[in-house]
Amino acid sequence: MSGTYLGMPAFPVAAKAALGNETLRGNLRHATHTIRDKREKAVAELDDWALLREAGKQIKDHTLRHLDRYLVQLEESVTAAGGVVHWARDAAEANRIVAELVKATGESEVVKVKSMATQEIGLNEALEAEGISAYETDLAELIVQLGDDLPSHILVPAIHRNRGEIRDIFREQMGAWGRAAPEGLSDTPADLAEAARLHLREKFLRAKVGVSGANFMVAETGTLVVVESEGNGRMCLTLPETLISVVGIEKIVPSWQDLEVFLQTLPRSSTAERMNPYTSMWTGTTDGDGPRAFHLVLLDNGRTDTLADEVGRQALRCIRCSACLNVCPVYERAGGHAYGSVYPGPIGAILSPQLRGIGSEVDASLPYASSLCGACYDVCPVAIDIPEVLVHLRERIADRGGKGHRLEKAAIKASGWVFDHPKVLAAGERVASRTRKLHPSRVPGAGAWTDSRDLPELPPEPFRDWWKKNRAEKNSAGNNSAESNSAESNSSAKNRGEGSAT
Amino acid sequence: MTAREEILARVRAAVADAPDAPPATRDYRTTHTGPERVVELLAENLADYRALVHRTDEEGLPALIATLLTTRGSTSVLAPPGVPAAWLAALAPEIARVEDIPGSTARELDQVDSVITGCALAVAETGTLVLDGSPDQGRRRVTLVPDHHICVVRVADQVVGSVPQAMPRLDPTRPLTWISGPSATSDIELDRVEGVHGPRTLEVVLVEN
Ligand code: SF4
């Protein structure tokens, strides 16, 4: 079973440990760079990207401002369509509701679609304690679950594993969970995927209860939406007799038409695809097609506390595309596990401490797990000003006990990158904080929650340009010094490779 | 207080002092594609996501479907009840016809070689087919469990340019499945592999008059 996040070391400690793991860093570097290069192309295909981003931001801000109204409307439309709505104040309550619903079916196993919300509440562990087995069916989640591991990326949770490791996990663990891996399983992705297909098909075809999250819920129609690639989501959403969806209250959009914005921005931002292979939409239950019973569990679990923070509430706009992870220099080096939360990377650094509070060492350290370079804000399809929230949270933490400075130093050191580039960091922070105020946060007349801001002006030099130039300089400097040191030992050759990011 | 009342009360308290946030302005485009480019773009984008694209007219459709099934070596085919009989008129007699019965199990479906359906519409810019459970499309699981899906698109009235053009034509009360290429995963070192759980092969037939 998946381990727990409780007792995780604070970011500086965990990041430092991750830095020593070369496989992890190599896998991460390859993955994040590949995705972000593809993403730029996918986004460039839409010349109205900035307007889609602005619309997405406005839709979410409007929904959050009137969340009570939309929650009630959603409840009405889901109920009218044949679903049953449950409300959960916190993780324990949500887990209890789900466990009771599963027990009422008389079943002792469920198939699951990858869902951040159910990871956040530790649903699998809670069900296990009640004697119910929960099977993750996303390939990456399967790898994580079989490896008794934790996910490290929102979108590609097993990004820290390479094919050899995955083959070993399948060979050793599949048999204990169901259909064993085929004899002589190789490490080619096609063979590994085939082994997962056979293993999981056994589970899908007999499953009576499915558990999912949702990417969106439409208040007007009661429609829930799940976007995915593999089809495991479709299996879990349509084959079982009972479907239970656990969804954070912030996932609402008011109208059917609103989906047109996010169905354009989410796939391009996350997997860099024009559209993900599968999108399922269901409205209550349909006779003769799909589950006969549908339960929606609306989850608070810290979201209303987050909503109450005037700067931090924008984190609730997040559509979990993970674009901010892939551009983050700190995430790239520290890896997802270092954040000690189901939400890693820049969004995790602002969301987790808000959902969970800043009482623990892990949560208090997260707002420092950033260089404030601003790249996360640039790519965010709903324009969450992550650096602004980070600074705001740091202030809150410093106000409470003044250990901010120590945490900041520790986090920066642990993230490795800026370790040997203090000037880059200093410049980055200066530029980020200077231009951040200048980024247009709203279009005139479109009133957002940030009415008190300065009017937008053009930044003297777009941050992206500065970043590219600066990195280019850094890289060529790195290469030069590498050449002059070419006679050195193997270990420094390795360092050289690490230092010259491509 | 019930959980419902408490959450709603927390929400109200949380936003009590928040400034107004009116509904979104929609300045973005309704499409990025001129009508003359739409069909070509659909074909390109489907192919880019490794769907196999075929083009024919009404008259050529039965023979094409027959050829696709024979080439693949299918011995059984499921067509939902609303699929026009003409589409299957040229099928080799040894290919067994399987009914789309509500009571049939997923295991039984797993034994079916190929599925043929129509669609509600297709979106060119994203290379997407949308199925809405109409009689020519069947239950959601029939296009999921078997490994080979042939989807027929009537170009004249089923192709739109963009997602914003698709939304008003769809009925949210129906169960909707948007399909963009065959099932795929990139979870292993980001290598794309087709067909982890859904059909490994998606063939799209664009029918023009
Ligand atoms: S914060 Fe923005 S970029 Fe990051 S995952 Fe959320 S929506 Fe995507």
Image (tube, grey):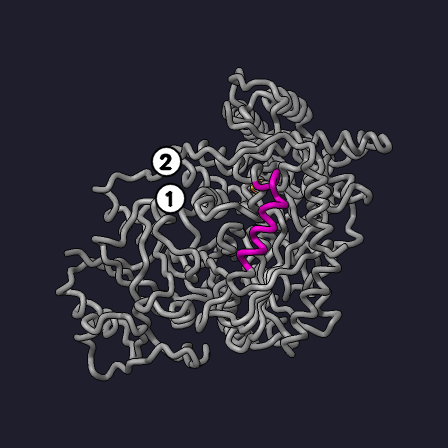
Name the subunit of mark 1: B
Q: Amino acid at mark 1?
A: Pro
Q: Is label 2's Cβ within 8 Å of ligand 1?
A: no
What residue is rendered at 34% in x and 65% in y? B134
Place of residue A243 in the rendered image (x, y in percent of width and height, measured from the top left): 56, 67
Asked if residue A480 can be seen in this view, the reply is no
Q: Which residue is mark 1?
A: B164
Foreground residue among B187 and B206: B206
SS of the residue under disc 2: loop
Q: Is residue A45 left or right of residue B187?
A: left
Q: In the displayed structure, would residue B94 be above or below residue A362?
A: below
Label 2: few (<14), some (14–19) or many (≥20) C-alpha neighbours in 10 Å: some
* Letter of the chain that mark 2 sits on in the rendering: B
Q: Earlier in the sequence, mark 1 or mark 2?
A: 2
- The residue located at (61%, 27%) in the rendering is A450
| Element marked by disc 1 | helix
Whether pointer 1 and pointer 2 mark residues with C-beta atoms closer than 8 Å, the reply is yes
Q: Are marks 1 and 2 on the same chain?
A: yes
Q: Residue at x 22, y 54 (%)?
A: B155
The image shows residue B164 at horizontal and vertical percentages of 37, 44
Residue B2 % position (x, y): 74, 56
Q: Amino acid at mark 2?
A: Arg
Q: Which of the 4 quarters of the picture holds residue A454?
A: top right
In the foreground, A194 or B80: B80
Residue furthest toward the left? B59
Distance, label 1 to label 2, CA atoms, is 8 Å
Q: Which region of the structure is painted magenta?
A: A63-78
Q: Which residue is disc 2 drawn over? A: B29
